[in-house]
Structures are given as structure tokens and as C-alpha cells.
Image (cartoon, rainbow, N blue to C red):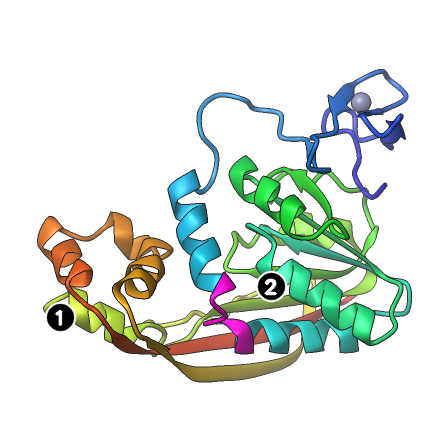
Amino acid sequence: MIFICPICKQKLELFENKIVKCPSGHSFDRAKEGYYPLLLSSGGMHGDNAQMVEARRAFLSAGFYAPLARRVAALAAELLPPGGTVLDAGCGEGYYTSVIADALASAGSCGQVCGFDISKDAVRRAAKRDPRLHLAVAGSYHIPVADRSVDLLVDLFSPLAAEEFCRVLKSHGVFLMAIPAEDHLFELKAAVYDTPYRNSPKDPALPGFDRLATERLTFRMDLSDRAAVSALFGMTPYAYRTSAEGRARVAALDRLSVTADFLLFTYRLSI
Ligand SMILES: [Zn+2]
């Protein structure tokens, strides 16, 4: 059990496969799908809503981001020490997490693959997708895992909680992150906005980490129907920032050839 009590930070133990408890008696039900709801604040919706989760699930499951998933998984398999622990921060519906688990299995690694996300809808889907994953509902700024317990932390487009990442990583642990690069989804923006801008990715300054490598991964995605175009649009932040006119332009697109462009950074904790 990688997860700890979100209240007192002690180890959690699983009882009868139904409930986890810490020595102080705080207890949390294990969801029937197999994940642990460890988010303390319960007011309102957290993270992506069911609609956004569904758009992303549909788009990712169609394989459009497979080159990114494969590269991330290959790096994870290369960087994880034997029997190590991977933690996918903001794992969403577990698409990348599951591909990482596949890569480790093919490499004969017996490492454990864990993840968390603040969206319960997303974590439920992740648990259904892949029973090998160890999953919790939690946020990046209060990660319910012990200090120095993770060998490889992965952050794909989730908040960069550098202090928490430093805390949970083992000494000289590895951190892998991806961010959108300059040309990412430019053609989609050009279809929606009168004056589309290219991204200007900021080099993440990460105190306490040494950069191991930076690579850029660029590929083209040919979306051949309206469902794919609207799924892509629905999983971007643009979906919520675009005027009705812009949304109508997207809805009218029955195909789109669009660039995927990412920067992948790997770091090692300095101490
Ligand atoms: Zn406790």
C-alpha cells in the first residue's frame, strides 16, 4: 500500500479488501472499482467534470496521442530502477499510466504503477481501465504518499507541485514531465480564432532538481470526423474560453489535420 492517511500521514492498511485504516483510526472505503478516495475537502466538484473526462477518454482511446504515450512509457521503463515505484501525478483516466504499466511489464520490471487525480470521475475510469494500477483520488498539493517513497514521478499536463514532488521522491529519484510545445494544436486554434497564437512554453525552473534531458516530440494527427475534432476540442482549455461563434466553427469541422507538439523534460532530484 503506497498510500498514507491524508489526515495524520501514517500508513494505511487494507482490511478485508474493503476499507483502509491508519493506526489512529481514520478510515476510508475502498471503491468497488479498486481505488481509494483520499481527498479530504468534499465541497463541490474537483478537477475535470464527467464531460471533459469523457472527451479525453474518447480522444486518447482512439490513439491520437499514442506516440507521446509510447515515448513516455519507454522513458519510464528506462529510468525506473528494478522493482521501483512509479507515481503518475494527475493521472486522469489512466491512459498514460496504463501504457507505462504495459512498458514495464514488457521490460520484465516488477515495479508498481500508482497514480492519483483530483477528479473522481477520472480515477474511477482509470481503475476500470487497468486493475494493475494503484489509484487514489487526491490532489497534487497534498499527495497521500509517504516522504521518499517514489522512484519515478510522472507529470503529464498536471499542476507542477515542485515541493510535494521533492518530498515524495526518493533520494536521486527521477521526475518526468511533458508540456505543450510551440506548435501544439496550432491548426485547431487557427480554425477557432481569428488571430491564433503559438504557445510560448516556459522552461520549468525546478529548484532541487538537475535536468537530465530535454526532447521535443512532434507528430501529426489526422482527425477524420466531427466526433474526433470535437473530442479534441472538448479536452482542451479552449473549450471553456471560446465564444459561441468559435465553438460553432469547431462543430462544423468534419476533418482536421493537426500538429501535436510536446516538450519532455527529465530531471533527477539533486539530493
Ligand atoms: Zn490517520
Disc 1 from disc 2: Cα separation: 33 Å
Image-quadrant location for residue 160: bottom right
Q: Between tags 1 and 2, which lies in front?
A: 1
Badge 1 or badge 2: first in the primary sequence:
1
Q: Residue furthest top?
A: 25
Q: Which mark is residue 195?
A: 1
Q: Quadrant of ligand 1?
A: top right
Mark 2 neighbour class, 10 Å CA radius: few under 14, some 14 to 19, many 20 or more: some
Q: Which residues are magenta?
A: 61-67
Image x and y of residue 192, in percent: 17, 65
Image x and y of residue 150, in percent: 80, 55
Mark 1 neighbour class, 10 Å CA radius: few under 14, some 14 to 19, many 20 or more: few
Q: Is residue 72 left or right of residue 133?
A: left
Where 148 sits versus 105, above or below? above
Q: Is residue 216 left or right of residue 106?
A: left
Amino acid identity at mark 1: Thr
Image-quadrant location for residue 73: bottom right
Where 151 sits versus 218, above or below? above
Amino acid identity at mark 2: Leu
| Residue 82 visible in the displayed image | yes
| Residue 207 visible in the displayed image | no
Query: Mark 1 and 2 residues: CB-CB less than 8 Å, in contact?
Result: no
Image x and y of residue 2, in percent: 82, 44
Q: Which mark is residue 206?
A: 2
In front of the other: 147 or 91: 91
Image quarter where the C terminus lies is: bottom right
